[in-house]
Amino acid sequence: MCEIPLDYVDAPHSAGSKSWSIARRLRPAQGEGITKPGLVWLGGFASDMSGLKAQFVDEWAKKNGQAFLRFDYSGHGASKGKFIDGSISDWLEQSLSLFHQSTQGPQILIGSSMGAWIALLMARRLGLVENSKRLAGLILLAPAVDFTECLIWSQLDNPTQRMIIDQGQWLRPNAYGAQPTPITRLLIEDGRRHLLLGDIIKTHAPVHIIHGLRDSDVPWRHVLNLLDHICADPVTLSCIADGDHRLSRPEDLSQLGAALDHMIASLEQTAREE
């Protein structure tokens, strides 16, 4: 596969602090792909843009000639900054900045785990500024919406909660690597500013959710709760009976490719009917 060169983009900080230096790879559209929506990858918590799913989407975009943006949040992968300094607010702001700086026209947001939460927050923000036409669709993989509160904080015992409050962080065992993942007080408290599951979620575009029923990080009941809140836009749910949280096996990636094919075909059919 022809790897798109990595470059760095300055993402302004709304609080007036120094801009973030964000690493990205931007594949331009070619041929017939110029007329189709671009794709934007939004990675998971403590993940980076070099993962198997992001690479699969890059190859899919190359084959179909469509534009594809992927990047690392601050403190992730090749981007600058410290992971423990990051928050949902920061990573949302960076995602919106890269979206506006690096894409044109309608886009499909592809969010994995935390990235699905970021995608829904982006949809809400774009809707508030009457820019929702930039959204052609959302594909959400193992959506960890509100994970800081629902999937971490509420599951912790009192001593661990107290450690986060008093010491500023807790080192959470990492099922996917040797090093534990810091869960900071900043992450938990800031996450409460962005909770979505207490109200109707408007995406302003069709949504396709792919979830593994053996996902131990995001239980399937959490996804059903999310479905209850996305009630103003069309939603498709694809369940993979033996899929885990990573959804990175060849058969999982095949489901992702099928979701992309179906969404593009549906968008083209709608355009012909209008």
Image (cartoon, rainbow, N blue to C red):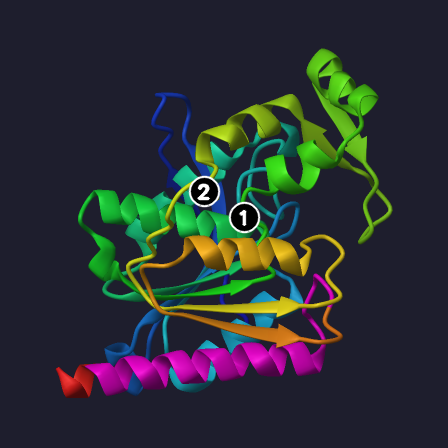
List the single residue furthest toward the right: 178
Which residue bears the numbered disc 1? Answer: 145
Q: Which quadrant would the N terminus be assigned to in this image? A: bottom right
Can you give x and y, in whole percent of width and height, for residue 21 in the image?
A: 47, 38
Q: Residue 152: which quarter of the image? A: top right
Query: What residue range appears in magenta?
Result: 244-270
Which amino acid type is marked by label 1? Val
Can you give x and y, in whole percent of width and height, for residue 197 in the image?
A: 48, 44
In the image, what residue occupies the spot 20% across and 52% down?
131
- Above or below, 82 against 220 in this view is above
4 vs 136, nearest the viewer: 136
Q: Which quadrant would the C terminus be assigned to in this image? A: bottom left
In the image, what residue occupies the spot 80% across and 28% down?
157
- Above or below, 64 against 125 in this view is below
CB under 8 Å between discs 1 and 2: yes
Which residue bears the numbered disc 2? Answer: 196
- Main SS of the magenta segment? helix
Q: Earlier in the sequence, mark 1 or mark 2?
A: 1
Q: On residue 171, which mark appears?
A: none
- What is the CA distance from the residue labelled 1 to the residue labelled 2? 7 Å
